[in-house]
Amino acid sequence: MRVHAYEWNHMNEDYLVVPIGKLKEKNKPFGSDPTTQKLIDIPQEMFDVNSVAYHKRYRVALLSSNLAGPNDNDIEDYLNSYLPTDAEYKIRLRPIMRNIALEKIRDAQEARSVTISLNIGRPLNDFLSGQVHGERNALGHLKALMEFSKTTLESNTFTLTLGLGKKKKATLDIGALIELLESINLDANCIDEIAVNYRNKPDEKIDIAKLKDSTAVLKIFFPIKGTQLGTEYILNNMDEILRNERQKYYSQVKEHFLNATDIGDDYEINKVWEEMPVV
């Protein structure tokens, strides 16, 4: 593996693109001799490449998805090879996750009901993703009701359904529903399932979105035909795309860096460097 010539926006050095290649040692393609039309070996070293695009202001890195190229673990190992073996810190790429079911609800026109099913025999301390403020907060009342069911009624299960009854053309407030669901830690052990009945159009059948275990690594798509993303194309489009997709990752990034500790001085990019051994 090796880093190839990287590029950054000369008008704004907040973001740059770093191509990282894995040497192609097997199944190398052939070239064509323009004179004889015979196939010949290509003399240059060839690499399967993935690009890492880093945006300093948004504090996120994008990794392109060439399956033959280096994956996130390969890139971690490569970057850590520049650190002493006894270094106190290691470089890690932490994936930003998305909840597929939650995005379906976000795009829906109608939400008919939400059902929260819990096993309150398990700890409830991580049910909320953040601190509840205010006595009249709906989540505060919900958590108090859960605690009452657990400690006073000695119940092990808790199911709450919020719906619209017989109002066929009504809908729950989608924005308020999303705010409620985003305030819940969907990975909490006490959650058995959270299900939302929704539909995208009034004339469609009601569908069910189940939020538990519905997560995947966030993918951001560039509007280009084919699968090969050039470094210059990524560089010219990543700022606008990250700005447009900000709602999908902003809260996770903010939470991740909430209690971060800065160490050392600001770094500088070495435009010329002596290449060290590759891994």
Image (tube, grey):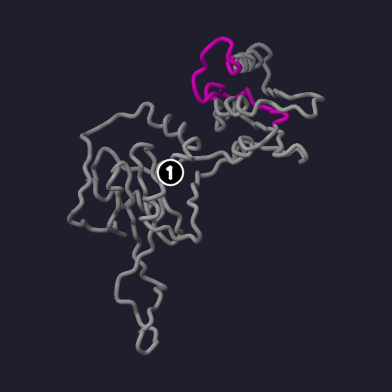
Along the horizontal axis of the image, is 273 left or right of 232? left
Secondary element under disc 1, as helix, strand or loop, is: helix
Farthest residue toward the right? 166
x, y percentage for residue 136?
59, 11
The N terminus: image quadrant: bottom left
| Residue at horizontal 48 percent and vertical 40 percent from the top | 244
The residue depicted at 20 percent of the width and 57 percent of the height is: 275
Please give left or right for residue 270 compared with residue 232 in the image: left
Nearer to me, 234 or 102: 234
- Whether residue 177 is situated above or below residue 214 in the rendered picture: above
Neighbour tally class for label 1: few under 14, some 14-19, many 20 plus, Cα within 10 Å = few
- Residue 56 sits in quarter: top left
What residue is drawn where x is 20% and y is 34%? 265
Question: Which range of residues does the magenta coloring cover?
Answer: 111-140
Left or right, 195 with reference to 33: right
- Which residue occupies the extreme bottom position in the image? 36
